[in-house]
């Protein structure tokens, strides 16, 4: 896509700090890292988000995820790592070419602050939710 920032990074029109590349994917450092080693993994085939991602693109992308995670781990010895993918502006997506964030965690004070507010569901409600999703698979 000609007006897509990450497509331009893949074709080299916009510079990036490459970490890994193969036929299907490209990995590079996030320009505004949340923590040391913050890396983005993207498919070379443009798709806006997970909703639009074909299965083979997903397969090829996630096949590389352990390699990237383990390289970051070996380089910087984080004590944990979040892999995050934002889909849609409401979910925090700002670049509309699918990307998987690898965010290493070092201690509680740095960058990423995930504050999950959990909700109470009865087992009947959980079954109802599951049935609604299953009906759409
Ligand atoms: P999102 O908010 O869409 O999940 O994440 C987009 C990410 O892309 C952000 O973390 C942002 O720092 C990163 N980003 C935006 N523009 C560029 C760029 O030109 N180069 C690189 N390497 N990262 C970028
Ligand atoms: Zn793109």
Image (cartoon, grey):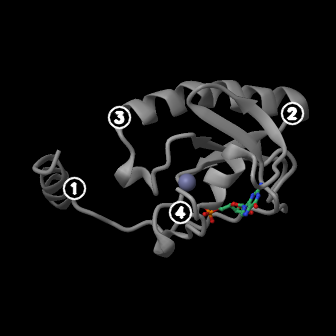
| Residue position marked by numbered label 2 in the rendering | 77
Q: How many angstroms separate mark 2 from mark 4 (CA)?
A: 31 Å
Structural crowding at the residue carrying mark 3, measured as other residues with C-alpha within 10 Å and reported as few (<14), some (14–19) or many (≥20)? few
* Rendered-image quadrant of the C terminus: top left
Q: How many angstroms separate mark 3 from mark 2 (CA)?
A: 32 Å
Circle nearer the N terminus (2, 4): 2
| Residue position marked by numbered label 4 in the rendering | 96
Observer-side mark, 3 or 1, equals 3
Ligand 2 within 8 angstroms of badge 3 C-beta: no
In the image, which disc is placed on residue 55?
A: 3
Residue 81: x percent and y percent? Answer: 70, 42
Observer-side mark, 2 or 4, equals 4
Residue, x 70% and y 65% (percent of image)?
A: 113
Confirm whether residue 40 shows in the render. Answer: no
| Residue position marked by numbered label 1 in the rendering | 126
Q: How many angstroms separate mark 2 from mark 1 (CA)?
A: 38 Å
Q: How many angstroms separate mark 3 from mark 4 (CA)?
A: 18 Å
Q: How many angstroms separate mark 3 from mark 1 (CA)?
A: 27 Å
For mark 2, give the secondary structure. Answer: loop
For mark 3, give the secondary structure. Answer: helix
Circle nearer the N terminus (1, 4): 4
Circle nearer the N terminus (3, 4): 3
Residue, x 71% and y 50% (percent of image)?
A: 9
Residue 28: x percent and y percent? Answer: 76, 43
Residue, x 84% and y 61% (percent of image)?
A: 110
Residue 134: x percent and y percent? Answer: 15, 46
Ligand 1 within 8 angstroms of badge 2 C-beta: no
């Amino acid at each position: 896509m000609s007006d897509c920032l990450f497509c331009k990074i893949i074709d080299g029109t916009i510079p990036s700090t490459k970490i890994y590349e193969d036929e299907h994917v490209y990995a590079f450092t996030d320009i505004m890292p949340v923590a040391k080693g913050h890396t983005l993994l993207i498919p070379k085939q443009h798709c806006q988000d997970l909703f639009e991602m074909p299965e083979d693109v997903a397969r090829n992308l996630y096949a590389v995820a352990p390699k990237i995670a383990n390289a970051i781990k070996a380089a910087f010895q984080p004590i944990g790592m979040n892999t995050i993918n934002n889909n849609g502006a409401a979910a925090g997506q700002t670049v509309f070419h699918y990307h998987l964030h690898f965010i290493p965690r070092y201690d509680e004070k740095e960058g990423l602050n995930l504050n999950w507010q959990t909700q109470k569901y009865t087992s009947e409600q959980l079954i109802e939710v599951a049935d609604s999703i299953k009906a759409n698979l």
